[in-house]
Image (tube, rainbow, N blue to C red):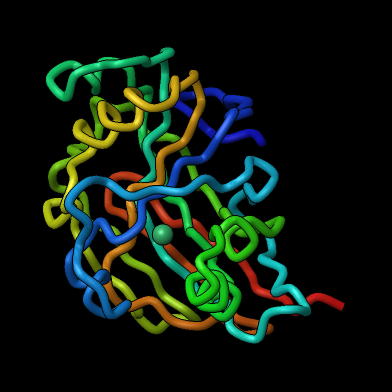
Amino acid sequence: MRIPFRDQELEIFPTKIVALAKNYKAHAQEMGGEVPAEPSFFLKPPSSLLSHGGTVILPQNSQRVDYEVELAVVMGQRAKNVSPENSLDFVLGYSLLIDVTARDLQAKAMKEKLPWTISKGFDTFAPFGPRLVPKEELDPFNCEIWLEVNGELKQRGNTCDLVFSVPELVSYISKIMTLEPMDIIATGTPSGVGPLQDGDLVAAGSPSIGVLEVKVKREG
Ligand code: MG
């Protein structure tokens, strides 16, 4: 996908999207759990990416698909075993990602102790944008993010409430899997998640990033 960056358009082909689970205490609680002792994450396929202005397709085999607004970190350099102290040196910039989730399929997977891949992995389940902000222009320790559905505010959070901070996440993940340039880390969602319906208009925003807008349509 192409995304505006400085005064050009950047072609982004991440090898993976790493997404954090329960990285805000209030969201962990609304999901009926506690925050994990160590970062907990899963992968979304790059094929789930959707550009600003695109349409999220609600799959026929799910009756409950949720929005989750998240600050997204985009890597600039290959990072392997980096420390939290210098992990931000490997970051290119930031954007917004909506971690669209088939909540009913996720609940079924959790009950059967199966992975979340299906519930998180449908095409269009990762709206991303509207632009990539250079890392110097955003403070990852104090970044407000919000989400509206049809003009109604549903989520408002700040990365100052992250359980594991951006430099901690980059470091932790890099000790497990090499982070490649353009790889995306979705840092987790604040509280207020809820369902999407056919015909909804979703806007996700952050003061220094802008507003990411997508439509919602039922498959078929
Ligand atoms: Mg999420």
Is residue 143 or residue 166 the one in the foreground? 166
Residue drawn 22% across the image and 57% down it: 36
Residue drawn 28% across the image and 80% down it: 32
Q: In this view, does 72 lie above or below 11?
A: below
Residue drawn 44% across the image and 35% down it: 132
Q: Dividing the image into 4 quarters, which one contains the N terminus?
A: top right
Q: Is residue 25 left or right of residue 63?
A: left
Q: Is residue 11 above or below residue 193?
A: above
Task: Give residue 88's quadrant in the image.
Answer: top left
**Label tally:** 0
Residue that sits furthest to the front in the current view: 112
Is residue 30 or residue 131 the one in the foreground? 30
Q: In this view, does 107 lie to the left or right of 173?
A: right
Q: Position of residue 81 (x, y in %)?
A: 30, 16
Q: Is residue 185 above or below residue 6?
A: below
Q: Where is residue 91 in the image (x, y as percent from the top left)?
A: 33, 23
Residue drawn 57% across the image and 54% down it: 126
Task: Give residue 216's quadrant in the image.
Answer: bottom right
Q: Is residue 56 left or right of residue 210?
A: right
Q: Where is residue 218 in the image (x, y as percent from the top left)?
A: 75, 79
Q: Position of residue 131 (x, y in %)?
A: 47, 40
Q: Dividing the image into 4 quarters, which one contains the C terminus?
A: bottom right
The image quadrant where one finds ligand 1 is bottom left
